[in-house]
């Protein structure tokens, strides 16, 4: 019996440790067990970040101006994370331009892309979007802003530096118009009609 327990205990410990970091899915066709990396539910990630001090980043934009999030206290700040060839991402950029035009210096807007500086400079060379275009976002702090929430994702940071609204990819996927969703959400917050909660 003691011999059996000695063999069983390591097997149980191994199963528990693998289970803690992975979730299992049974493949129907071959009955293999596939181990997937654990990914917390979207709601839990958002709940963790809401009403906490926003993570501070120090990063250059494509025109080589350095930005420190702490320098924008007293203003509303939008962080919008995008990737190449993403229709919802592109549609949302139009909203950023309109918001900046409407609110001017009351709001600071950052569009974070993981593309290179040169690639983004080609796209923005003849444009004046009004918002800050950030490059190589995975190097400059993107993962502090919940990469698991997908693309696009939007963070609203209030004047005191707290994250009070987060819109993940799955919410954008449920709308036919990313631009309108962003405009409506931010205008409701900025005009003080109501604080939007998840």
Image (cartoon, rainbow, N blue to C red):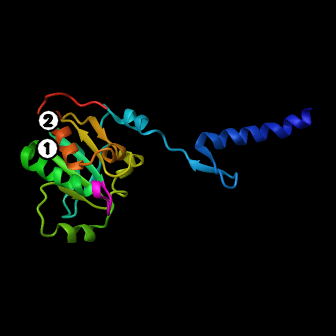
On the image, the x and y values in percent for residue 142 come to 35, 51
Q: Which residues are magenta?
A: 82-88
In the image, residue 87 sits, relative to residue 163, either above or below, namely: below
Residue at which label 1 appears: 107
> Quick check: marks 2 and 1 in contact, CB under 8 Å?
yes
Q: Is residue 135 above or below residue 144?
A: below
Q: Where does label 2 land, which residue?
A: 190
In front of the other: 81 or 182: 182
Q: Which quadrant: the N terminus?
A: top right
Left or right: 180 with respect to 37? left
- Magenta stretch encompasses residue 86: yes
Of the numbered discs 2 and 1, the one sitting upstream in the chain is 1
Residue 116 lies in quadrant: bottom left
Q: CA distance from mark 2 to mark 1?
A: 9 Å
Residue 121 locus on image (x, y percent) = 21, 69
Depth check, front residue: 177 or 33: 177
Q: Residue at x 17, y 40 (%)?
A: 184
Quadrant for the C terminus in the image: top left
In this rendering, would 55 be left or right of 111?
right
């Amino acid at each position: 019996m003691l011999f059996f327990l000695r063999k069983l205990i390591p097997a149980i410990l191994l199963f528990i440790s693998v289970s803690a970091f992975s979730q299992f899915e049974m493949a129907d066709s071959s009955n293999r067990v596939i181990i997937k990396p654990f990914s917390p539910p979207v709601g839990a990630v958002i709940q963790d970040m809401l009403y906490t001090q926003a993570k501070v980043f120090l990063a250059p934009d494509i025109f080589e101006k350095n930005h420190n999030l702490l320098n924008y206290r007293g203003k509303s700040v939008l962080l919008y994370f995008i990737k190449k060839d993403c229709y919802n991402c592109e549609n949302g950029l139009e909203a950023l331009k309109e918001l900046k035009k409407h609110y001017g210096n009351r709001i600071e807007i950052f569009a974070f892309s993981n593309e290179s500086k040169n690639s983004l400079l080609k796209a923005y060379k003849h444009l004046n979007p009004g918002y800050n275009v950030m490059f190589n976002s995975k190097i400059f702090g993107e993962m502090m802003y919940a990469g698991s929430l997908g693309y696009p994702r939007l963070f609203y940071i209030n004047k005191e530096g707290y994250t009070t609204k987060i819109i993940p990819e799955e919410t954008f996927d449920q709308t036919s118009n990313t631009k309108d969703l962003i405009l409506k959400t931010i205008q409701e917050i900025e005009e003080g009609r109501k604080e939007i909660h998840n």
